[in-house]
Image: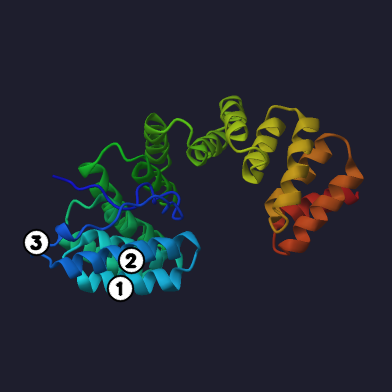
Amino acid sequence: MRRQAVIAGCGIALLAFAGCALVHPQDDPRSPSSSRVVLSQQLSQSAQAAIDRHDYAQAQADLEQLAVVLPRSAEARHRLGRVLQLQGRFTEALASYRRAVELDPEYVEALIGQGEIEVQFGRYDRALVHFDDAIEIDPQRSEAHFARAQSLEVLGRADEAMAAYFRTLELDATLAPAILRIATLQLQRRQPEQALTRLEQVLELTPDDPEALHQRGLAQLALNHPSLAVADLTLATQRLTNRPDVYYHLAQALDADHKTSDALVAAQQALKLAPDYNDARVLTMKLRR
């Protein structure tokens, strides 16, 4: 029977360590001595305290010791993998997740962790294998469906990605990142009305989300509401200051709103951030006429 992991829901929020259960020495098939029981509990508690204060180096040291004390504990290996992942030590994290799955082939969180690391390495096909395995074991894990959808989208499999995002929302209707991705894909499919409805929902859940503001601005522009588009895109540029595409879209909205001089400034900023941005160059030349 599949065991519950120590850290639940970490596929979307790696920092969700609070309230983790202790790794139980009973997971080790060998009968532990009372001293090992005490030591393993101490190490587990110390690791969690270190995680809570973001001292990942100390947490790693504690969990490495715990893995020695409990060599058959998949949970200890999974927790170590998460801490390594938080430190950006992806190769080591992947090895730790693999060991957890070797110890418990149905350890869903470790399978998701492997997929997340493969994504970090740009190996999306491999990531999908791990996400699919996790979903086969536990179809109710929204974070596995979301991660799968993201990989499918990167691979250009937009229809499958959309279906996976909707499946994610069936399991967690308030997951703003999934709603945002659906809206973005709807905009790409020239469905601005549907996209706008979902973007309103995203901004209710996560007010001032800069990417949601960006996408809502695009939806408003597509619906021929340039003033509303300018308002959203102006806010988006204030938060996404290094995104030339956001400045370019603001320039388009300002131009549609008959604010030529302001549009030129925005287009020039887009070109400054990305000198090879041909669309921004063409728009800049048009606005200068």
**Left or right side of 145 for 184:** right
What residue sits 18% from the left and 51% below the top? 106
Look at the picture and state if 289 lies above or below 202.
Answer: below
What residue sits 75% from the left and 35% below the top? 229
Q: In the rendered structure, which amino acid carries the disc numbered 1?
A: Glu
Name the mark on residue 29.
Answer: 3
Labels 1 & 2 near each other (Cβ < 8 A): yes
Q: Where is residue 101 in the image (x, y as percent from the top left)?
A: 21, 59
Quote the CA–CA distance across marks 2 and 3: 20 Å
Q: In the rendered structure, which amino acid carries the disc numbered 3?
A: Pro
Which secondary structure lies at badge 2?
helix
Task: Locate residue 144: give its quadrant.
Answer: top left
Q: In the rendered structure, which amino acid carries the disc numbered 2?
A: Leu
**Left or right side of 147 for 195:** right
Q: List the residue tagged with mark 1.
A: 64
Q: Position of residue 130 (x, y in %)?
A: 27, 54
Quote the CA–CA distance across marks 1 and 3: 19 Å
Q: List the residue tagged with mark 2.
A: 80
Q: Which colour scheme is used?
A: rainbow
Q: Nearer the viewer, residue 132 or 191?
A: 132
Q: Which comes sooner in the sequence, label 1 or label 2?
A: 1
Labels 2 & 3 near each other (Cβ < 8 A): no
Which secondary structure lies at badge 3?
loop
Quote the CA–CA distance across marks 1 and 2: 7 Å
Is residue 247 among the parts visible in the rendering?
no
Task: Locate residue 40: give its quadrant.
Answer: bottom left
Q: Nearer the viewer, residue 9 or 230?
A: 9
Q: Which comes sooner in the sequence, label 2 or label 3?
A: 3
